[in-house]
Amino acid sequence: MDKEEAKRRIDELTKEINRYNRAYYLLSTPEISDQEFDILLKELEALETAFPAFTSPDSPTHRVGGGITKEFKQVTHQYPMLSLSNTYSRDEVQEWEGRIHKLLEEGVEYVCELKFDGVAIGLTYRQGILIQAVTRGDGVEGDDITTNVKTIQSIPLQLTGDGYPAEFEIRGEIFMPHASFRYLNKFRTEEGEATFANPRNAASGSLKMQDSAEVAKRRLNCFLYYLPDTNLPFQTHYESLQAARNWGFPISDYIARCSSIEEIFEFITMWDQNRKSLPFDIDGVVIKVNNFNQQEILGSTAKSPRWAIAFKFKAEQAATELISVDFQVGRTGAVTPVANLRPVLLAGTIVKRASLHNADVIAALDLHMGDTVYVEKGGEIIPKITSVKLDLRPPDADKVAFIDNCPECNTPLVRTEGEAAWYCPNSDSCPPQIKGRLEHFISRKAMNIESLGEGKIELLFDRGFIKNAADLYNLTYDELFGLERIYVDEENGKERKVSFKEKTVHNILQGIEQSKSIPFERVLYGLGIRHAGETVAKKLATHFLSVEALMQADYNTLLEVDEVGEKIALSLIDFFQLPENLEVIRRLQNAGLNFDIKPQQRSIVRDRLTGKTVVISGKFELHSRDELKQMIEQNGGKNNSSISSKTSFLLAGINIGPEKQKKAESLGIPLISEKEFLRMLD
Ligand code: IVH
């Protein structure tokens, strides 16, 4: 490709990808699939590497992160980052409005906005290009987190339209939407890592990370709400926000201009009732005087402007008594404290337990046994304790102490520097860790042994039949037949006995047998190596091709693998150093599990489908759909579920849907049979 053509294609891709990003993040109307998006982005990345001079400052490749910041630079704010005076009382809002009215002696218009619950940020643009992003810090100085902020898709790297000042700052809030928060905590639970208490903590924790590629994965979002410069070409705050929207900034649609206290109250009431339906947290409403001249007359105190006030919503709370604290041990040994509460009704459900997350949360609350505590429901299903009613603390109440020893095996707990969680290091013989690992091994995304479940694993462990994954493959019909399980009926507390009959035993053994054909990457994931989740396992498997090669890899070799950083590399080295882990692997190998990608699969040229997007439809004779999908990925192709003009071909089996066939034909997309497909790879 010559220079001219490269420049043209880079410009074209930059514009196109930015447009897709806007459609997705600002307008919530995705125009293409994730896979199609990735293909375009990869093409752009490759061109930018070959022709770096043509990289545009607003290139979407800046968003994937990759920059590591060891320590954030401290930056002084040009305009101090003030906070807002806030109140929970409508009377105080009315008094504030009355004062303003009196002071200004003329009609006042207000702008009512949502109060986003996240992390305040100041963004500076020069000639329309984002040059700096700084946190609030102490209001005078903040951290320069530009590299991390650039990964947030809704924040423009280059402005659109015209009329923006040559250099200006815009402020707003970075937050984590509920969907991202749930996804992150679910992932962390699966990986045995401590969960975040709420979306705000998760957003703030994410922005502090040193590796911006990690930040990019956190799916943060942002709304901008204030331009602090005093020489803007606008008369009002409202106008400035409309202009900012036209320049490409994410500005909330939920903004109202109000001319009376009644209208302000209407906005407050409306959002107090409807805030639960928003896909992110708000903790109140902000009311601002609209006119800049009037704002100037009112001025600011040292802490906050007089022209704005925040009305904060009261969270739905209930007071109850802390009865005790349990400490639960997870698969990786992480210890999570859980509060047992006197049952209390909160937002329509009875609450009996609340997560305390980690030792820091207990310490911050200064929790004592028998305390009367307030519980609230946040972004999570499990409620949290938000405060303690100190005047009701029983005399001589004992402070809740975090345990020093594992509640299950009594081993002294350890804490890694910089991590919130305490761990039980006795991974070898601590019962919940062993059971957790076995449950993980049989889980759907790993070995997918559906005929075993939590209850059966527990029983087999308690009876001494299994201690590790390899023991599963030694189970016999005679051992299993007749085994008795005792259930306690939750409703009436009565015990019920069930014994393993022929069919159950047959299903269990068949499930175990079938798991021997599960591919290497899922076996690797099933081993439950700390921090090696599904994606990492896949990358490791395709990079090293066999467990032997993986075990021999040293630290630097491991770091060469996509997605593998310092933390994962060290965890892998630790895992493969333990003789008991090596022994389990050896036994699993002998049992016939896949610990490599077979040579015949390897010989399939691994880049035959690079850049191709494939849609699979119908039933197939020689391979399952999952196997075919895997082959596509192993050859560098992408799977997609719906046909579009970007689809390279439709891998068509028997009985493909007529709609799909019609669509493919109308777009001129070729239909490829299973046999033709296999020939393509061979
Ligand atoms: S205006 C000088 N508008 O709330 C006024 N702030 O408790 C600048 N916040 O520090 C702030 N939503 O981080 C403003 N719509 C909104 C807001 C908002 C959330 C945050 C902001 C501020 C804090 C004050």
Image: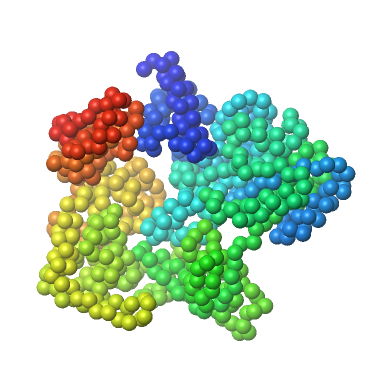
Residue 573, horizontal then vertical, whole percent: 32, 54
* Viewer-proximal residue among 403 and 278: 278
Q: What's the residue at 45%, 74% (across, down)?
A: 326
Judged left or right of residue 226, residue 593 is: left
Residue 412, horizontal then vertical, whole percent: 41, 73
Judged left or right of residue 54, residue 509 is: left
Residue 350, horizontal then vertical, whole percent: 50, 71
Q: What's the residue at 24%, 60% (across, down)?
A: 450
Q: Is residue 364 visible?
A: no
Q: Is residue 54 above or below residue 141?
A: above
Q: Is residue 18 above or below residue 194?
A: above
* Viewer-proximal residue among 114 and 160: 114
Quadrant of the image containing the C terminus: top left
Q: What's the residue at 48%, 45% (across, down)?
A: 219
Q: Among all residues in the image, which is located at the extreme front?
A: 658
Judged left or right of residue 430, residue 79 is: right
Number of marks in the rendered image: 0
Judged left or right of residue 60, residue 297 is: right
Quadrant of the image containing the N terminus: top left
Q: Is residue 72 above or below residue 389?
A: above
Residue 119, horizontal then vertical, whole percent: 60, 49
Q: How is the image coloured?
A: rainbow
Q: What's the residue at 17%, 38% (across, down)?
A: 654
Q: Quadrant of residue 368?
A: bottom right
Q: Is residue 647 above or below residue 254?
A: above
Q: Is residue 216 visible?
A: yes
